Image (spheres, grey):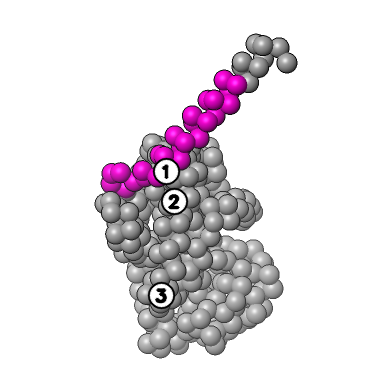
Amino acid sequence: MKTGKLAALLAGVGLALIIQPTVASEADAYPDRAVRIIVPYTPGGFNDTLARTASDYLTKKWKQSVVVENKPGGNTLIGNTAAAQAAPDGYTLLITPLPFSALPGLYRDKMPYDALKDFEPVIWAGSTQNILTVRADSKFKSVKDLIDYAKANPGKVNYGSTGSGSSNHLSMELFLEMTGTKMTHIPYKGSAPAVAALLAGDIDVLFDNLPNVYPNISAGKLTALGATGAKRAALLPDVPTVAEAGVPGYEVSVWFGMQAPAGTPAPIINKVNAGMTDMLKEKDVIERFGKQGVEVVASTPEQFKKLVNAEVKKWTGVIDRAGIKIE
């Protein structure tokens, strides 16, 4: 080997040896100041619960302040964009639920960030299900009843949602596609008004997160016809999945996770993942989330990245085929 090439090789090795300890020491020192967790929703709901549980746990574990910052608005685009544009140093984290994966299909070239390139997945924290619900006195006693009536009366069934691209809207759009039915969409500004509309008879049917409808199901005010998961919900063991009830292959997992800005060093991503995993293994956390119908997952960053990629592809396809557009 020529002297010049040997010198260049040794210089490269030396540089690598210098950089490697620097990255490691950066992760070891992290965090040395306050960390913020952005929630792209108003306070309340499980996204906020997840963030505040993480805030309490990680503050104690890291002996550094971990604060929750609610940044609602723009169908979550405001909070998501703030996270995408933050410094990739681990001091900004983002709570990311299923609707994150629908936004690329809904907004297309109007997206202020790239959902797959501008974030580093940290952890898939947990999942729940949407429950297909009707009033207790509804004429629909089963999923089959609903499908048969909707086929015979296109557009006459009104279904509610918490807005275009929400998990309950997507759940119904997939249901309509797979059953070949048509219903009329009536969006509301949140779960509470949507459930109130169902109870009042303003809408006929609603898919909604299990934690949101469980109290009224338990009270006998609403009837659950089906659950969107691959298996029955632990809180509603007598309620069949939608697939069991007559729509083979139907499945929607309402997932919750955490991401960081793209470029955040892998050792820091792994450190946050480890802290979150420790939290999610706590017995009281598992029990508390379980009472809300949320099953703990605690994935690796790689597993969560695979999920997000697959979900973006899935929901972009559903949105395209349904012709859903947001101006």
Q: Element at badge 2?
A: helix
Q: The residue under label 3 is which amino acid type?
A: Lys
Residue designated by label 2: 271
Return the mark for residue 171. none
> Around disc 3, counting alpha carbons within 10 Å, would you say few (fewer than 14), some (14 to 19), or many (20 or more)?
few
- Residue 67 seen in the figure: no
Q: Is residue 15 magenta?
A: yes
Nearer-the-camera pick, 97 or 288: 288
Q: Element at badge 3?
A: helix
Q: Residue 306: where, in percent of width, then height?
A: 60, 53
Residue designated by label 1: 27
Tell me, yes or no, whether the two marked residues, 2 and 1, touch with CB atoms within 8 Å: yes
Q: The residue under label 2 is which amino acid type?
A: Lys
Region rendered in magenta: 10-35
Residue designated by label 3: 283
Above/below status of 262 relative to 93: above
